[in-house]
Image (cartoon, grey):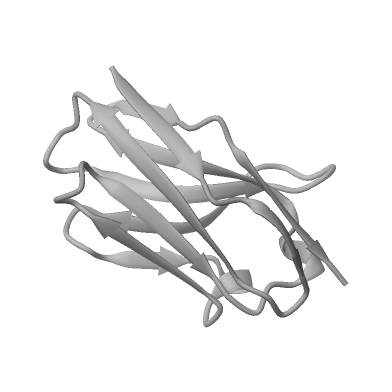
């Protein structure tokens, strides 16, 4: 079993920055991917950014150049999302995800609110 604990959400004005963290614990494989998804009001959950255990990163077009995903494998598989130049449309609940083997695990979500 794997547990994911997120932190770092909050409220910020447009143009500001926030950093999300997600710490994974439990039975974690050496090969996995960690990702951030988000779900805005009235919208479907969407992928924001993903990073493999080897460090390969992929971003949604809407956040390219503004968000940076990183991970610290030494620190028990912690993944971060640095969010810069935030826009009101970035307002959402952000979820951490870990995928390994045939299993997917989710965090509880953290709210990010960007005001104009």
Residue 100, picture quadrant: top left
Tell me where residue 48 appears, x and y as whole percent.
Answer: 54, 58
Residue at image coords 19%, 24%: 27
- Image height of 104 relative to 97, above or below: above
Residue toward you, 14 or 95: 14
Residue at image coords 53%, 77%: 64
On-image quarter of the C terminus: bottom right
Tell me where residue 11 appears, x and y as whole percent.
Answer: 74, 57
On-image quarter of the N terminus: top left
Q: Is residue 24 left or right of residue 42?
A: left
Residue toward you, 75 or 2: 75
Q: Is residue 40 left or right of residue 102?
A: right
- Residue extending furthest toward the top: 1
Q: Is residue 98 left or right of residue 90?
A: left
Residue toward you, 21 or 95: 21
Residue at image coords 84%, 42%: 42
- Residue extending furthest toward the right: 116
Q: Is residue 88 left or right of residue 92?
A: right
- Image height of 88 relative to 20, above or below: below
What is the count of numbered marks? Answer: 0
- Image height of 18 relative to 41, above or below: below
Residue at image coords 59%, 37%: 109
Tell me where residue 5 appears, x and y as whole percent.
Answer: 43, 34
């Amino acid at each position: 079993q794997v547990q994911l604990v997120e932190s770092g959400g909050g409220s910020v004005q447009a143009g500001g920055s926030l950093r999300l963290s997600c710490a994974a614990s439990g039975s974690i494989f050496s090969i996995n991917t960690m990702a951030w998804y988000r779900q805005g009001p009235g919208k479907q959950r969407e992928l924001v950014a993903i990073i493999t255990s080897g460090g390969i990163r992929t971003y949604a077009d809407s956040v390219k150049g503004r968000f940076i995903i990183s991970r610290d494998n030494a620190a028990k598989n912690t993944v971060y999302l640095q969010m810069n130049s935030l826009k009101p449309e970035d307002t959402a609940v952000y979820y951490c995800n870990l995928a390994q083997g045939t299993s997917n695990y989710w965090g509880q979500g953290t709210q990010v609110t960007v005001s104009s």
